[in-house]
């Protein structure tokens, strides 16, 4: 896999493009000179995790003929500063799924567990350094 970032301005705004060809904007916080014209890199990590597991869960539930009318995923991460550096990696992450539809609770629970433990590569990437938990609701 390959991505390319092209600087857009004289500060921190970049346009990123991957193999899909879809453009994404990345920028820094205005407090350090960014212009708030894109997502922050650490936000993108959480978005990637949410998107990765969402795709898995939807695929699994569709195969089980479950009807998803709506799905909202909220990913929250707690960061801890590494002493002696400016690094603040995620140490705890929670992925919350809010479903609407005609869904069997056991099938939803199993689909999420399969994604988190077997299918989602973003979970595999982040789990060695962050405790990843999940929760869900069906309305």
Image: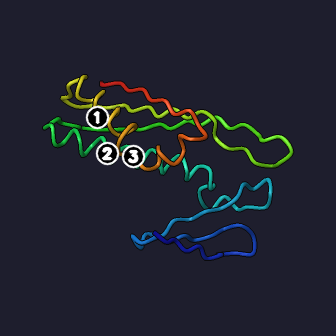
Q: Which residue is mark 1?
A: 111
Query: What residue lies at 39% left-to-right and 33% top-to-bottom?
Result: 97
Q: Which residue is mark 2?
A: 56
Classify residue 58 by image quadrant. Answer: top left
Query: What residue lies at 61% left-to-right and 40% top-to-bottom?
Result: 129
**Labelled disc at residue 120:** 3
Contact? badges 2 and 1 (CB < 8 Å):
yes
Q: List the single residue furthest toward the left.
A: 65
Classify residue 105 by image quadrant. Answer: top left
Mark 2 or mark 1, which has the lower sequence index?
Answer: 2
- Identify the element where label 3 is drawn: loop
Counting from the top left corner in percent of width and height, residue 88 is at 72, 44
Contact? badges 3 and 2 (CB < 8 Å):
yes
Query: What residue lies at 45% left-to-right and 69% top-to-bottom?
Result: 1
Counting from the top left corner in percent of width and height, residue 72 is at 38, 38
Mark 3 or mark 2, which has the lower sequence index?
Answer: 2
Label 3, label 1: how far apart the Cα atoms are = 11 Å
Of the pair 68 and 45, the residue shown nearer to us: 45
- Identify the element where label 2 is drawn: helix
């Amino acid at each position: 896999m390959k991505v390319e970032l092209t600087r857009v301005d004289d500060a921190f705004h970049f346009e990123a493009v991957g193999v899909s060809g879809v453009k994404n904007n990345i920028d820094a916080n205005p407090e350090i000179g960014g212009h708030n014209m894109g997502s922050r890199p650490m936000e993108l990590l959480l978005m990637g995790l949410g998107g990765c597991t969402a795709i898995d869960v939807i695929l699994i539930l569709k195969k089980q003929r479950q009807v998803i009318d709506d799905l909202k995923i909220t990913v929250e991460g707690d960061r801890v500063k590494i002493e002696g550096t400016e690094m603040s990696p995620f140490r705890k992450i929670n992925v919350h799924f809010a479903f609407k539809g005609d869904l069997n609770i056991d099938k939803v629970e199993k689909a999420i567990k399969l994604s988190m433990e077997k299918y989602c590569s973003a979970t595999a990437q982040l789990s060695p350094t962050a405790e990843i938990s999940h929760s869900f609701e069906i309305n």
